[in-house]
Structures are given as C-alpha cells and as structure tokens.
Image (cartoon, rainbow, N blue to C red):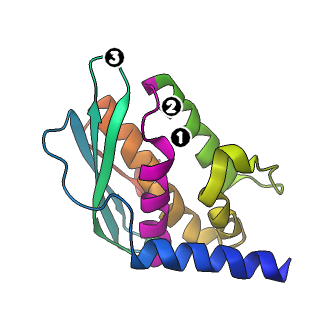
C-alpha cells in the first residue's frame, strides 16, 4: 500500500507542477467560479460544448492548494470529449468516490489519475479541496454562476 501512496502522491505533485488544460478558454459556452473558504482555493472552470453536445474543451484557472489544482487538472483531462450526460455521470462518480465513507471500489479504466485523490477521504478538511473543481464544473454546465463549498 505504501508504494501505491507514493505513486498517488507523485501523480498529484506532477499535476500540480504541470497542470493540464490551465488557462482561459475562448470561445467558450460556459464558465463558473468555485470557492472553498475552508482552504482559500479559488478556481474558475471553462467549458465549450460543440453543436453535437460534446465537451470538446474544458480548462481552469485559479489559485489553490496542491490538491485543488491537481484535482482540477485531472478533471479537465477526464471529461474531455464526453457528452453532457457522460460528464454529469462522471462528476457524480468522482464526488461519490471522494466523499465515500467506506473504501470505494475504483474502476481505474474510468477514474485514471483521479484514483490518486482517493486518499483525501482520510483527511476530511481536504475533501472540499478535491471536490471543488467538480462542483465548479457542474455549475459551469448549468450556467448558475458559481459555487461556494460552505453553502452545500
Ligand atoms: Zn485546498
């Protein structure tokens, strides 16, 4: 298990150091801001939906801790080129995995690098850091302006 934790830590550090898909998206079909006052993480997530209803680009900007930024980076790669329904299912699966009380069963073919974040479940104060990007993506898709994790 230690080897696995080391690997997971490396994945998080690598995404934090070299985030995938960081930057504003223009043109875009939606964006939203997410704020986690517990930690001070502030992210903005941008989405672009094609006419056929696929998300052909998802990017993020913002400042936050390593976990919040790694989660955003992993998320943008994990939902690219999916349909809206598929993205919504993946958001639900990610949030469920990150907040599960029992050790979740993880399908690595679906979760990929996201599995690296499963360890945050053991640090309740950091769970909102990991789920912030996903809630913000949900808000960007709905077009409801943004989320603050305290309001959940
Ligand atoms: Zn944080």
Mark 2 vs mark 3, foreground winner is 3
Q: Nearer the viewer, residue 5 or 109?
A: 109
Return the disc, 3 or 1, that comes first in the chain's sequence.
3
**CB atoms of marks 2 and 3 within 8 Å:** no
Residue 31's place in the image compared with 33, above or below, is above
Secondary structure state at the residue bearing disc 3: loop
Q: Principal SS element in the magenta part?
A: helix
* Foreground of the two, 52 or 31: 52
Residue corresponding to mark 3? 52
Alpha carbon distance from label 2 to label 3: 16 Å
Task: Classify mark 3: residues with Cα within 10 Å, few (<14), some (14-19) or many (20+).
Answer: few
36 falls in the magenta region: no
Task: Find disc 1 in the rendering and name its residue.
Answer: 91
Q: Position of residue 141 (x, y in %)?
A: 34, 33
Q: Looking at the image, is 110 positioned above or below residue 98?
A: above
Q: Quadrant of ligand 1?
A: bottom left
Front position in the image: 131 or 30: 30
* Mark 3 CB within 8 Å of ligand 1: no
Which type of secondary structure does the marked residue at label 2 adopt? helix
Q: Is residue 72 magenta?
A: yes
State the mark number for residue 110. none
Q: Nearer the viewer, mark 3 or mark 1?
A: 3
The picture places residue 91, in percent across and down from the top left corner, at: 53, 40
| Mark 1 within 8 Å of ligand 1, using the beta carbon | no
Stretch in magenta = 66-84
Q: In whole angstroms, how far apart are the C-alphas of marks 3 and 1? A: 20 Å
Q: Which residue, given by chain and number where applicable, does mark 2 sit on?
A: 88
Query: Which residue sits at x=47%, y=31%?
Result: 82
Q: CA distance from mark 2 to mark 1?
A: 5 Å
Q: Is residue 106 left or right of residue 59?
A: right
Furthest residue in direction left, as rendered: 27
Q: Secondary structure at mark 1?
A: helix
């Amino acid at each position: 298990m230690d080897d696995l934790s080391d690997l997971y830590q490396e994945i998080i550090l690598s995404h934090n150091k070299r985030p995938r898909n960081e930057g504003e998206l223009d043109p875009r079909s939606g964006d939203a801001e997410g704020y986690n006052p517990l930690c001070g993480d502030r992210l903005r997530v941008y989405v672009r939906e094609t006419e056929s209803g696929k998300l052909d680009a998802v990017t993020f900007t913002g400042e936050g801790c390593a976990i919040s930024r790694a989660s955003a980076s992993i998320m943008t790669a994990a939902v690219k080129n999916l349909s809206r329904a598929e993205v919504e299912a993946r958001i639900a699966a990610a949030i469920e995995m990150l907040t599960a009380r029992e050790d979740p069963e993880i399908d690595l073919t679906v979760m990929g690098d996201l599995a690296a974040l499963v360890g945050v479940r053991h640090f309740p104060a950091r769970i909102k850091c990991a789920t912030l990007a996903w809630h913000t993506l949900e808000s960007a898709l709905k077009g409801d302006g943004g989320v603050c994790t305290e309001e959940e």
